[in-house]
Amino acid sequence: MALIKLLDEVRPDPQATLTKYQHDPDFAQEIDSLFQILSTKSKSRSKKRRTRRRTSVFDPVELYHQKGEKYLRQQLQHLEVEQLKDMIAEHGMDSSRRAMRWKKRDRLLELIVKTASCRARKGDAFR
């Protein structure tokens, strides 16, 4: 309730509010606490968006680059569907987020191998 009263007092004349802020320490403290409350609320909103997926077991692009496609496929065969989805999400391999609805392991595996292959070979024309 005190915040609403304070807001009503601040809105009508910004110059008078600034003068009062500079000369009245109690008023200045109320304004400062108001801004602190508002900044805390905006920070809590930005922290709301958290990833619910776990971190991936390894970096598929790095593994492809170091040991090749065949070895990457062998390592991916040992992972469960959810682990493959974790890998796709962490490494940004599906911007449309459609792969998160896929159920078949082979489909997810192919997406990872294809994306890792493209990313590992990126820039080869300049080498």
Image (cartoon, helix red, strand yellow):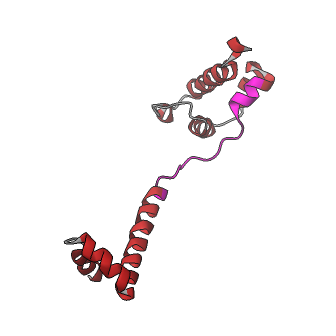
* Residue 40 left/right relative to 123: left
Residue at figure coordinates x 23%, y 78% from the top left:
9
Q: How many marks?
A: 0
Residue 86 vertical position relative to residue 119 in the rendered view, above or below: below
Q: Nearer the viewer, residue 95 or 8?
A: 8
Res 74 visible: no
Residue at figure coordinates x 45%, y 31% from the top left:
96
Q: Is 55 one of the magenta-colored residues?
A: yes
Provide residue 74's location: percent of width, then percent of height: 75, 26
Provide residue 87's location: percent of width, then percent of height: 62, 37
Residue 20 vertical position relative to residue 37 in the rendered view, above or below: below
Residue at figure coordinates x 62%, y 20% from the top left:
114
* Residue 83 left/right relative to 99: right
Residue at figure coordinates x 57%, y 37% from the top left:
85
Residue 66 figure quarter: top right
Residue 40 figure quarter: bottom left
Q: Nearer the viewer, residue 71 or 116?
A: 116
Provide the residue span drawn in magenta.
Answer: 47-65
* Residue 92 left/right relative to 78: left
Residue reaching furthest to the top: 125
Residue 91 figure quarter: top right
Provide residue 127's location: percent of width, then percent of height: 74, 14
Residue 25 vertical position relative to residue 89 in the rendered view, above or below: below
Provide residue 51's location: percent of width, then percent of height: 53, 49
* Residue 7 left/right relative to 27: left
Residue 90 vertical position relative to residue 35 in the rendered view, above or below: above
Q: Nearer the viewer, residue 68 or 22?
A: 22
Q: Is 52 one of the magenta-colored residues?
A: yes
Quadrant of the snapshot with the N terminus = bottom left
Res 66 visible: yes
